[in-house]
Amino acid sequence: MQVRDAVEDDAAAMAAIADAPQDVMRNLVHDRTVRVAEPDIVDADPNADAAGTDPQLLGFVSFDAKQDAVHVTQLDGTDDACELLLSEPIRFAERERMIVELLVPEANDGVAAAARSQGFDDVGSGPRFEGVQTTRYRLEP
């Protein structure tokens, strides 16, 4: 699996992963730092990008930095992809000596497991979004 910066053409695949509108994902790519995980390339076809197919993504993470914290605004995908992608905002935060904060929806066990495996602490309940309770996770350098 490899991680790269997201581009606008990733919006359709990200929307499918997050079950969200494509235009919302396109705006996310423009408004936040977004990284995507994709499978390792097995057969490098130099014309693959000309085929016009949507990229095959395993997951994505979006984050931004405000004051003294890096906020992970969205994380979704396979369990392995989430764990790998979470290292992106962590790496940024370590360089800038900032904490990392993440809100995990109640039913998203894969993201919660990824956060715990990366050293995040459960610091209590977060806000409700569309009626779904969240848990606040924090990682301090």
Image: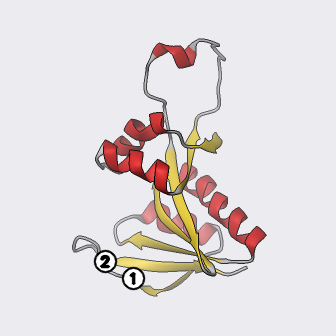
Image point (41%, 37%), residue name? 13
Label whose residue precedes the other's in the sequence (2 or 1): 1
Q: Position of residue 130 (x, y in %)?
A: 23, 70
Question: Between residues 22 and 57, which one lies in front from this camera angle?
Answer: 22
As drawn, the label of residue 126 is 1
Q: Position of residue 19 (x, y in %)?
A: 30, 48
Answer yes or no: is residue 77 visible: no
Task: Specify how the rendered protein is coloured.
Answer: secondary structure
Location of residue 112 with respect to 49 vertically, above or below: below
State which quarter of the image contains the C terminus.
Answer: bottom right
Q: Residue furthest left?
A: 131
Q: Amino acid at mark 2?
A: Gln
Image point (40%, 50%), residue name? 27
Q: Position of residue 60 (x, y in %)?
A: 51, 49
Q: Amino acid at mark 1?
A: Gly
Task: Report the side of 123 relative to 125 (left or right).
Answer: right
Location of residue 112 with respect to 77 vertically, above or below: below
Q: How many marks?
A: 2
Q: Secondary structure at mark 1?
A: loop
State which quarter of the image contains the N terminus.
Answer: top right
Separation of marks 2 and 1 at Cα, in angstroms: 7 Å
Image point (63%, 42%), residue name? 4
Question: Between residues 61 and 123, which one lies in front from this camera angle?
Answer: 61
Q: Residue furthest right?
A: 95
Provide the residue designation for mark 2.
133
Image point (77%, 68%), residue name? 95
Q: Secondary structure at mark 2?
A: loop
Determine contact: label 2, label 1, CB under 8 Å: yes
